[in-house]
Image: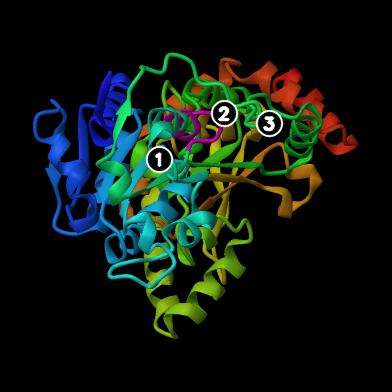
């Protein structure tokens, strides 16, 4: 069927299930917009090409489909460098159509000419510069295939204005074959074993995960892993925080890692952590933090007054952490830690108090907001009852056995004995 190349592009977009595109018109891509008028595809007119690129990203993230962007040549194309880079870094499937000057003007420094192909090469999965209009339908379908498969990402199609108006014989493309493009879809078993060993040997492992969990549809598997590992905290990157990938009953979450203080909060040496923050925030920070600790300590003492089997063993002095000691007749510290982790209470092993007290002490950070102490008061009794009933006994013992150290093995035996 004979039709203009731009009309063939519209047919390809509809064949790929595209129902909305984002863009800004210009001289070099006006033929594309002419074809768009009665193509049955919704167009969202943006005020700047960069905004159109980010809008297409948002559409792709929200729908799981490939986002589509239109921009003109020269400054229009260079304006989408930032969203293309963002899509490349965040693994967002995107296909960008950019207009280009006529083929006879390419390389002559013509009006609004830019080497879009070369500029974007490092920030896309693949780029196409159309030289033969007959190849346009195949190129469009290949671009969508590359954008959505393997690790998703942006693909750019640079279309000279004169070729976009050319009449071509359009035949629908039903099969895309790219022998040289075989993306990896299975994990490397050796790397997986090394990662599993590192996690098993870690004293306080943390899962730091992001938007790739959403892209892979692996939220359920992540939740299963976190619950199976029990005492493992997991934090998320900004993409994971925006998209909320955690599903199911897991409550072991810590926070979103961004910069400085949020990352520092993960430091298990709480005294060093607060010293680092003091250096960042000025000398007035420590007195303020100590006032928060004194307030939270008073709240904690009130909480413990009504709870049997737990007492304040070490009050914070120079640092911002305290230790709770469990009675020998009650559950082990490891069981209580897991029960509290499952209720989103940040607790730490009492390792620094000596091996003989490792099974009976847990540490708390008292530098958090008042709401953290109120939450602890609400869930402590329930966590103690669950631990005393042996809910976590065997899983915790198995986790300790997996560490393979003499100290962990001894703790596992004590956990199995019930204290």
Q: Is residue 83 left or right of residue 184?
A: left
**Along the line of sight, which residue is nearer the eye, 162 or 153?**
162
- Quadrant occupied by the C terminus: top right
Residue at numbered disc 1? 376
Q: Secondary structure at mark 1?
A: helix
The residue depicted at 32 percent of the width and 56 percent of the height is 102
Count the labels in the image: 3
Q: Is residue 312 left or right of residue 39?
A: right
- Where residue 385 sits in the image (x, y, percent)? 49, 21
CA–CA distance between discs 2 and 1?
21 Å
Q: Residue at x 23, y 50 (%)?
A: 29
Q: Does the image show residue 54?
A: no
Highlighted magenta segment, given as a residue range: 143-152
Q: Residue furthest left?
A: 38
Q: Position of residue 49 (x, y in %)?
A: 24, 57
Looking at marks 1 and 3 on the same chain, the residue that comes earlier in the sequence is marked by 3
Q: Nearer the viewer, residue 201 or 161?
A: 161
The reply, left or right, for residue 52 in relation to residue 45 is: right
Q: Quadrant of the N terminus?
A: top left
Give the residue at mark 2. 226
Q: Position of residue 417 (x, y in %)?
A: 76, 19
Numbered disc in front, either 2 or 1: 2
Question: Which residue is painted at 51% across and 28% down in the image?
Answer: 149
Real-space Cα distance between discs 1 and 3?
A: 22 Å
For the residues labelled 3 and 2, the Cα–Cα distance comes to 29 Å
- Give the main secondary structure, helix, strand or loop, of the magenta stretch: helix
Q: Is residue 139 above or below residue 320?
A: above
- Residue labelled with disc 3: 328
């Amino acid at each position: 069927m004979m039709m203009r190349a731009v009309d063939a592009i519209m047919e390809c977009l509809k064949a790929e299930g595209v129902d909305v595109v984002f863009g800004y018109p210009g001289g070099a891509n006006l033929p594309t917009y002419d074809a768009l008028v009665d193509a049955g595809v919704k167009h969202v007119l943006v005020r700047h090409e960069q905004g159109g690129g980010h809008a297409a990203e948002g559409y792709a993230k929200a729908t799981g489909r490939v986002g589509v962007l239109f921009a003109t040549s020269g400054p229009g194309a260079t304006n989408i460098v930032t969203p293309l880079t963002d899509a490349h870094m965040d693994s967002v499937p995107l296909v960008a159509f950019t207009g280009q000057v006529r083929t006879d003007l390419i390389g002559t420094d013509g009006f609004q000419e830019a080497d879009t192909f070369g500029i974007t090469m490092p920030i896309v999965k693949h780029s196409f510069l159309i030289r033969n209009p007959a190849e346009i339908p195949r190129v469009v379908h290949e671009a969508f295939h590359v954008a959505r498969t393997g690790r998703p990402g942006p693909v750019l199609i640079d279309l000279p204005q004169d070729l976009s108006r050319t009449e071509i014989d359009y035949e629908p493309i039903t099969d895309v074959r790219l022998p040289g493009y075989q993306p990896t879809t299975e994990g490397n078993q050796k790397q997986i074993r090394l990662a599993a060993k590192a996690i098993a040997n870690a004293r306080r492992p943390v899962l730091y995960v992001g938007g790739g969990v959403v892209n892979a549809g692996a939220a359920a598997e992540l939740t299963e892993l976190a619950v199976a590992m029990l005492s493992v905290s997991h934090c998320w990157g900004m993409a994971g925080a925006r998209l909320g990938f955690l599903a199911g009953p897991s409550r072991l979450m810590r926070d979103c890692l961004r910069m400085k203080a949020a990352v520092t909060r993960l430091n298990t040496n709480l005294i060093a952590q607060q010293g680092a923050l003091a250096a960042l925030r000025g000398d007035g920070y420590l007195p303020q933090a100590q006032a928060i600790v004194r307030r939270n300590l008073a709240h904690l003492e009130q909480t413990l007054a009504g709870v049997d089997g737990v007492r304040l063993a070490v009050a914070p002095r120079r640092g911002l952490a305290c230790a709770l000691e469990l009675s020998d007749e009650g559950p082990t510290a490891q069981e209580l830690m897991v029960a509290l982790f499952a209720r989103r209470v940040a607790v730490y092993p009492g390792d620094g108090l000596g091996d003989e007290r490792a099974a009976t002490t847990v540490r708390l950070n008292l530098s958090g907001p008042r709401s953290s102490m109120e939450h602890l008061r609400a869930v402590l009794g329930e966590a103690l009852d669950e631990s005393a009933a042996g809910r976590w006994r065997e899983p915790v013992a198995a986790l300790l056995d997996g560490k393979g150290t003499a100290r962990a093995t001894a703790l596992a035996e004590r956990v199995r004995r019930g204290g």
